[in-house]
Amino acid sequence: MGIGALEITHKRMSDLTKAEVSVLRKLVVTFPNHENFSRFELWLWHWRVQKSVWVAIIEINCDIIGWAAVALGEGWKTGLAGVYVHPKYRGRYFARYVLFSLFAHCANTPEIKQRLDYIRYQENKEKLFRPLFEYWGFKDGFQYHEEQKARESAAQAEIKNSLDEAK
């Protein structure tokens, strides 16, 4: 059985219409899990505060079945990614498809790419997220802090060496 016409739209979350936000809210509430609704509200809050959330909306036959989003951090090049697909469509690779499309959009949009090196995601979802964002050249956001510590250690060692040489 075919799935019908599949379409993915990329937008800033701030460019979503009230009707689109309403549909996305209803979509999340269809799954009886308060955590999913809270997570969606967090995305909306992030957009209102930072205005730097990009979303990909996946539709089949003009019905929204899911979304993926990446919120860009301020001052450090890390974004937070999330995805939601209606339970009826899970297990059919729609989450991978919409995430792949979103990361491709991020990698090919200079406004986003210059602000994004690392992507963080829900901890237990590494198998879903990591291969998709690494394909587009982004790094795992959980590695950011480890790399930052290594950079700081190297800088401290360099300072110590130069102080020792000055003696």
Image: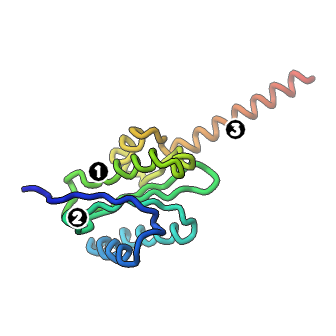
In-front residue for pair 141/64: 64
Give the left or right position of residue 52, taking residue 167 as reference. left
Q: Position of residue 99 (x, y in %)?
A: 35, 52
Q: Which residue is mark 3?
A: 152
Q: Is residue 25 positioned above or below 83 on the image? A: below
Q: Residues within 10 Å of mark 3 (few under 14, many from 20)?
A: few
**Furthest residue in direction right, as rendered:** 167
Numbered disc total: 3
Which residue is found at the position 19% from the left and 53% from the top? 92
Relative to 65, is 117 on the left or the right? right
Q: Tag on residue 97?
A: 1
Task: State left or right for residue 139 relative to residue 145.
Answer: left
Q: Quadrant of the N terminus?
A: bottom left
Residue at the location (41% across, 59% down)?
Answer: 69
Is residue 17 positioned above or below 128 on the image? below
Local secondary structure at mark 3: helix
Task: Give the residue at x 45% y 68%.
Answer: 15
- Residue positioned 18% across, 59% down in the render: 5
Q: Are marks 3 and 1 in contact (CB under 8 Å)?
A: no
Crowding at mark 1 (Cα within 10 Å: few <14, some 14-19, many 20+): some
